[in-house]
Amino acid sequence: MANPEYSGKLDKSVLNHYLSLESPEGHVQCEYIWVDGTGQGIRSKCKTMDFVPKKAEECPVWNYDGSSTYQAEGSNSDMYLHPVALFRDPFRRGEHKLVLCEVYKYNKEPAETNKRHSCKKVMDEAKSSIPWFGIEQEYTLLSPDGHPFGWPKNGFPGPQGPYYCGVGANRVYGRDIVEAHYRACLYAGVKIAGCNAEVMPAQWEFQVGPCEGIDMGDHLWIGRYILERVAEDFGVVVTMDPKPMPGDWNGAGAHCNFSTLKMRQKGGIKEIEDAIDRMSNHHTRHIQAYDPKQGEDNKRRLTGLHETSSIEDFSAGVANRGASIRIPRQVAAEGCGYLEDRRPSSNCDPYAVTEIIVCTAVLNK
């Protein structure tokens, strides 16, 4: 197995010399990014273009070896990358681009882990409701040996309590990575809304949104890609595992805030309550959509402890962080706003999450 410490120990000042070289006029590097066959792994490769693309549709369809990404057999391995969203490249900078892609098989059908394809259809169908989303992406930083970053090698840090939104070297670990990621997302055009240290030490969160429709998944996946790349430069590992440490430690989720135009307008609390009622009838469907293993990963997290609901039961309440769906107290007081679905796991596919929410809460199907 390759040593993940190695890249973090390279002298970055050497790389900066080469990155400062000017690209030939009219030539840009476009990093094609996609989701692999695990449904949570990110892959990418780079293509030189002789023009600066202004939108994703201008970038050509490309291919790759799906047998090396858990998506095809070696005897029929070609998979196809269809560009769908374009962002600025915060690593190469200049005119260089990040190109988010959907994956299609040789028969022109979407790959099994291409959740964007069906999500886009649902978002188009519900477009008149103007669905907005915001996702709170929790994650954990690990040392190259798989141990939580900053934790004692032969023991544990003190109990949870001082770490959430903490300040100080004895309370937070890895802030440099968080700050670098935040600035890189802003540069790229990702709709990053904020960040904070989480309840478990070495665990952090960044928020993306508000995004309308399909943009939620696009911006979160690019935010994840940038996080992985930034951490790679620091020689630190990012895990989206929903329960990275067993025991009396918080897990990691991807709470999804959701609203429609009617929910955001005066008297929208009735729309919110009706949506929650419809969602309650499809609890199992939601759980299956909320992690790549159809609930198996989330089962370790949704225990009813550590600010979670039970995976077995649906619940809702005002300001209740132990419920499946929380109505923020301010929303209840103002009579309009949004709901927070606290069930999605940190390693969820945001396309699958937003699709099932719109299907049940808006389209009632």
Image (cartoon, grey):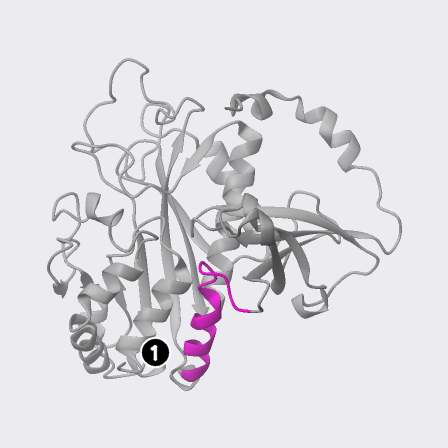
Query: How many numbered marks are there?
Result: 1
- Residue 313 lies left or right of residue 242; in this view the side is left
Farthest right residue in view: 25
Across and down, in percent, residue 239 comes to 39, 38
Q: Relative to residue 296, is residue 56 depicted above or below? A: below
Using the rendered image of the protein, determine whether residue 354 is visible from the camera's viewpoint: yes
> Is residue 111 magenta-colored?
yes
Q: Is residue 341 above or below residue 186?
A: below
The answer to whether 56 is drawn above or below residue 143 in the figure is below
Q: Amino acid at mark 1?
A: Thr
Classify residue 326 as left or right of residue 209: left
The answer to which quarter of the image holds residue 314 is bottom left
Give whichever of 208, 360 is nearer the camera: 360
Query: How far across and down, in percent of the image, does residue 252 sit?
Result: 29, 44
- Find residue 268 and report its image quarter: bottom left
- Residue density around tag 1, few if under 14, some if 14–19, many if 20 or more, within 10 Å: many
Picture residue at 62% right of the left edge, 64% below the top:
82
Q: Is residue 6 magenta?
A: no
Q: Which residues are magenta?
A: 109-125
Residue 183 on image: x %, y % = 55, 46
Q: Quadrant of the C terminus?
A: bottom left
Towards the viewer: 204 or 361: 361
Residue, disc 1: 260
